[in-house]
């Protein structure tokens, strides 16, 4: 495989993981227990924007009980392959309130490929962006 093919394959992987990340932003998926069970790694850990940490069980409970219909927007995605089974994604997320960006958050996600060759979110951190 030449370098172009490797770069093309890596970009396809990054695009796939960004798509999965964005699916987590849509309220219909954040409310879908089956989707969340599949996409979150069994050892998932999150350092929330609020400063609280949450494991998979706590995250599932919080997401499925939340009543937040505001759409989450995201941009400036950067991806780095750590090894064959691990990718780091960083980006900026925000919500819109009357056209004004609110809750701007710097985000980091670590995605891991499991034994079934499926990508799962292993770690996520949200840090409020200083303006």
Image (tube, rainbow, N blue to C red):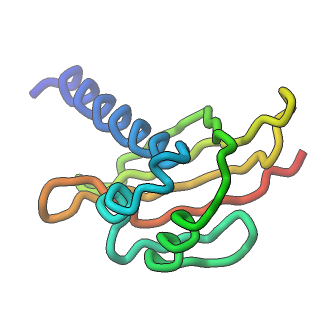
Q: Quadrant of the C terminus?
A: top right
State the residue lying farthest toward the top: 4
Front-most of 61 and 85? 61
- Report which quarter residue 70 is drawn in: top right
Question: Who's the residue at 24% across and 57% down the image?
Answer: 113
Tell me how many marks there are.
Answer: 0
Which of the 4 image quadrants contains residue 104? Answer: top right
Query: Residue 53 appears at what percent x and percent y?
Result: 61, 78
**Vertical position of residue 113 compared to residue 43: above or below:** above
Q: Is residue 49 left or right of residue 31?
A: right
Residue occupying the far left of the picture: 1
Q: Quadrant of residue 102?
A: top right
Q: Nearer the viewer, residue 68 or 131?
A: 68
Using the image, determine if residue 31 lies above or below residue 104: below
The image position of residue 8, as x and y in percent, is: 26, 24
Could you tell whether 1 is left or right of 126 in the image? left
Q: Position of residue 126 (x, y in %)?
A: 65, 59
On screen, 65 above or below 91?
A: below
Horizontally, residue 82 falls left or right of residue 64, namely left
Residue displayed at 32% across by 75% down: 42
For the N terminus, the image quarter is top left
Q: Give the residue displayed 67% in from the left and 43% down from the top.
A: 93
**Residue at 27 percent of width and 53 percent of height:** 119
- In percent of width and height, residue 11 lies at 33, 29
């Amino acid at each position: 495989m030449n370098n172009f093919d490797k770069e093309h394959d890596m970009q396809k992987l990054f695009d796939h993981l960004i798509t999965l990340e964005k699916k987590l932003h849509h309220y219909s998926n954040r409310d879908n227990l089956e989707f969340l069970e599949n996409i979150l790694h069994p050892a998932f850990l999150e350092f929330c924007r609020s400063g609280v940490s949450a494991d998979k069980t706590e995250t599932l409970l919080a997401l499925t009980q939340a009543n937040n219909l505001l759409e989450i927007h995201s941009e400036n995605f950067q991806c780095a392959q750590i090894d064959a089974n691990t990718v780091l994604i960083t980006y900026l997320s925000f919500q819109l309130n009357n056209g004004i960006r609110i809750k701007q958050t710097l985000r980091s996600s670590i995605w891991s490929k499991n034994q079934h060759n499926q990508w799962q979110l292993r770690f996520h951190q949200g840090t409020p962006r200083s303006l």
